[in-house]
Image (spheres, helix red, strand yellow):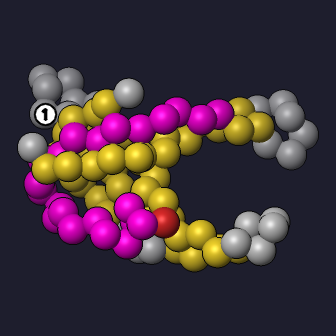
Amino acid sequence: MDFTGIIKHIGQIEQFETKNGTTCLTRDIVLETDEQYPRSACVTLRNDLAQSFNLCIGQRANVSFDPYARPNKEGTRFFNQLNAWRISPC
């Protein structure tokens, strides 16, 4: 899936360790469409994409992502996550 919009927020790189001991990097960015009724999306960049991110707030970008829904510990609620696999300026 793709989403095109203006970058409104760029989060800091966060580092964490997975259950198998691998170190992962993530960075969240927020994009907003420039339509009459703007829509926003928070997209997560991982590892190399998080490190090599070189766009700025206010720039227009196109993000390709995969949606993922994960349950809470009880399995009673689900949370959506958008994992980016490509981002490019427009």
**Considering the image in quadrants, where does the N terminus appear?**
top left
- Expressed as whole percent of the image width and height from the top left, the position of residue 37 reads 20, 24
Number of numbered discs present?
1
Residue 40 appearing in the image: no
* Magenta-drawn stretch contains 62: yes
Q: Residues within 10 Å of mark 1 (few under 14, many from 20)?
A: few
Residue occupying the point 76% across, 32% down: 77
Closer-to-camera residue (38/11): 11
Closer-to-camera residue (52/32): 52
Q: Is residue 83 above or below residue 18?
A: above
- Expressed as whole percent of the image width and height from the top left, the position of residue 18 reads 74, 67
**Considering the image in quadrants, where does the C terminus appear?**
top left
Closer-to-camera residue (44/77): 44
Residue occupying the point 13% across, 33% down: 34
* Magenta-drawn stretch contains 56: yes
Residue carrying label 1: 34
Residue occupying the point 12% across, 56% down: 58
Task: Classify residue 30 as left or right of residue 36.
Answer: right
Circle 1: residue type: Asp
- Expressed as whole percent of the image width and height from the top left, the position of residue 17 reads 70, 73
Residue 74 appearing in the image: yes
Q: Is residue 49 above or below residue 62?
A: below
Q: Locate residue 55: give its quadrant.
A: bottom left
Element type where label 1 sits in the image: loop
Closer-to-camera residue (25/80): 25
Q: Is residue 15 above or below residue 82?
A: below
Task: Classify residue 24 as left or right of residue 7.
Answer: right
Please, which residue is most extreme toward the right here? Answer: 74
Magenta region: 48-69
Task: Classify residue 81 as left or right of residue 5.
Answer: right
Please, which residue is most extreme toward the top here? Answer: 36
